[in-house]
Image (tube, grey):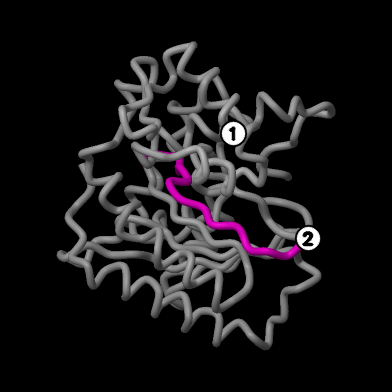
Amino acid sequence: MDLKTPPAYVVTSADHALRAAVMLQLEGGLTVSQVAERLGVARSTAHRLLQTLVYRDFAVQDDRRTYHPGPVLELATYSQSSVSRLRSQALGHLQRLVDVVGESANLTIRTGDRTRFIASVECQHALRVGSREGMVFPAYRTTGGLVLLAELSPSEVDGLYAPERYAERPEERPDLASLRAQLARVRRSGFALNDQLSERGVVAVGVPVRDAEGRAVAGLSVSMPSVRYDRHELPDLVATLHRAAGAIEAGGLAPLH
């Protein structure tokens, strides 16, 4: 089952504008050049997108020509939150991870039975797993989500996926026996391997990122097309992920609020 199926006819300009809004929401301040580079568009296109966001109050521009979240995004902005600090602390390490492994990297957090991608860095391959920054998915269907769910006790997992919580959406409830077995494997190995379980043609590997008290606060993962996955390289990939997670942790992560 795929995570999300893109619409048959994607309106590119709308997609770019939404991605720019998400970047502003998560990062707080960007220039036209930075947005153009991240979206892979011309500066003139990025300027038009940002001006449209300003017009609709999704963005504001300061006197140094930097764009910030506008009134529409204000309530959801993480500018001073622990999530924002985590993202800011991790972003450079995600880029270095991409440089080392040559595949896209993601950082996710969990809220209840959902995970949110708070940072994504794409690799440069023409065939690659694209950015999911800002997107929200069921936790059990993402690699980072599995890493974080594995930190819960069996009773906590049962409570999280109790039938009554899914009375109005039973199709979204996972098979608990299968999930328990999957989480047990993650606990034993210290990493999660998602070999096309969530999305056809995509393999992802993830490890936890822990705060100063040893609690897993995020999942760090790399995603790749299945045609480039080599199971013999898995131990080295996991070791690289653990080193990257350790580098993020070295900055002294506070518990998320």
Please identify the residue farthest to the right as the structure is shown: 8
| Residue 231: quarter of image | bottom right
Residue 215 placed where, x, y %?
Answer: 24, 61
Q: Amino acid at mark 1?
A: Ala
Assess disc 1: are there few (<14), some (14-19) or many (≥20) residues with their C-alpha within 10 Å of its C-alpha.
many
Q: Give the quarter of the figure containing the N terminus.
A: top right
Assess disc 2: are there few (<14), some (14-19) or many (≥20) residues with their C-alpha within 10 Å of its C-alpha.
few
Please identify the residue farthest to the top as the structure is shown: 56
Q: Give the quarter of the figure containing the C terminus.
A: top left
Rendered residue at 15%/64% (across/down) = 213
Q: Amino acid at mark 2?
A: Leu
How many discs appear? 2
Q: Toward the viewer: 250 or 42? A: 42
Q: Give above or below for 29 relative to 140.
A: above
Residue 137 placed where, x, y %?
Answer: 54, 39
Which is in the foreground here, disc 1 or disc 2?
1
Lateral position of residue 11 relative to residue 95, left or right: right
Q: Toward the viewer: 100 or 179? A: 100
Rendered residue at 78%/60% (across/down) = 127
Magenta includes 35? no
Q: State how far apart marks 1 and 2 are (Cα).
A: 24 Å
Lateral position of residue 17 relative to residue 248, left or right: right
Residue 90 placed where, x, y %?
Answer: 36, 60
Magenta includes 118? yes
**Which region of the structure is painted magenta?**
111-125
Rendered residue at 44%/19% (across/down) = 58
Lateral position of residue 238 relative to residue 256, left or right: right
Tag shown at residue 177: none
Reading the image, the residue beneath label 1 is 46
Lateral position of residue 247 relative to residue 80, left or right: right
Reading the image, the residue beneath label 2 is 127
Which element is circle 1 on? helix
